Image (cartoon, helix red, strand yellow):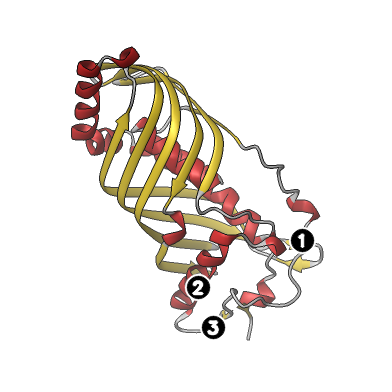
Amino acid sequence: MLLLTAIVVCATTLGCIVMIQATNSQKPIQQDQIPPLQTAPVWLNACKKKDPNLDECIRMTFQNMFPYLAKGIPEIGTRPFEPMHIDKVSLTKGQGAITLSGAFTNLIVHGPSNTTALYTKMDLVKNRLDIGLFIPTIKVESKYDLKGNLLLLPLVGVGDAKLYLKNVTTHVQTKIFFPKYMNETVMVASSMKVDFNLAAMRANFDNLFNGNKVLGRTVNTFLNQNALEVVNDLKENIGENLSTIFKQIMNDAFSHMPTKLWLQDD
């Protein structure tokens, strides 16, 4: 769910936001009540720390997990995320060329389950893990209620929103450490930095300006013509929000996967 929040917020606002509030109707999983795995499941690829091809092995560990994460992995407390559902994403951005306030609700996202791990690079001396991820297409449908300005144009409306993102590439730099959890050594991310690129994006907001078709078509056209420029201009803010989301996803999963099962000494 958290990955969805990051993608949806950054895509729909075309520049992410200063404040994010996301809620979900499902009862939160109490991660601290889930014991660590004791045996390696079929989806968990084992690697050796001294393997000269450790980076490729770790990449396969991530890649093998994605189809199972899409369906949900109860033993480590992760819910299904294809399609992803989220009740509400509230946003506020009050300064600069883009000013927006309001919320997206009833969000449904298709595509994240097709994530490909492009590369990983693990440095056990510097306690660093870098990951490259690629998602070919992401489709978002939601309700929206927004008010503000998009570059030179006002944007006001309440209605349905649809977004299509193409070729989303994300580069994640993570500082890691290996604490004990229920007497097992696990991996935890202490900090994270995220960069990303999109090949293309299209958006459509119905019922802008109380259904004024001329103004609505003008804003949607302008939005699509300038989407990548706006995203690139606000990439730093987007990366900061993505890092918060990705960090929690990683920690929720790997804090319940003892390293003895997937990152072995010998």
First in residue order: circle 1 vs circle 3: 3
Q: Residue at x 45, y 45 (%)?
A: 109
**Horizontal and vertical percent position of residue 69:** 56, 61
User: Crowding near pointer 1: few (<14 within 10 Å), some, many (20+)?
Assistant: some
Residue denoted by label 3: 50
Q: Which mark is residue 58?
A: 2
Q: Residue at x 46, y 71 (%)?
A: 59
Q: Give the SS element for disc 1.
A: strand
Q: Is residue 152 visible?
A: no
Say left or right for 236 vs 85: left
Q: Is residue 52 visible?
A: yes
Q: Give the SS element for disc 2.
A: helix
Q: Residue at x 68, y 76 (%)?
A: 260
Q: Amino acid at mark 3?
A: Lys
**Horizontal and vertical percent position of residue 249:** 58, 52
Residue denoted by label 1: 181
- Report which quarter residue 223 is drawn in: top left
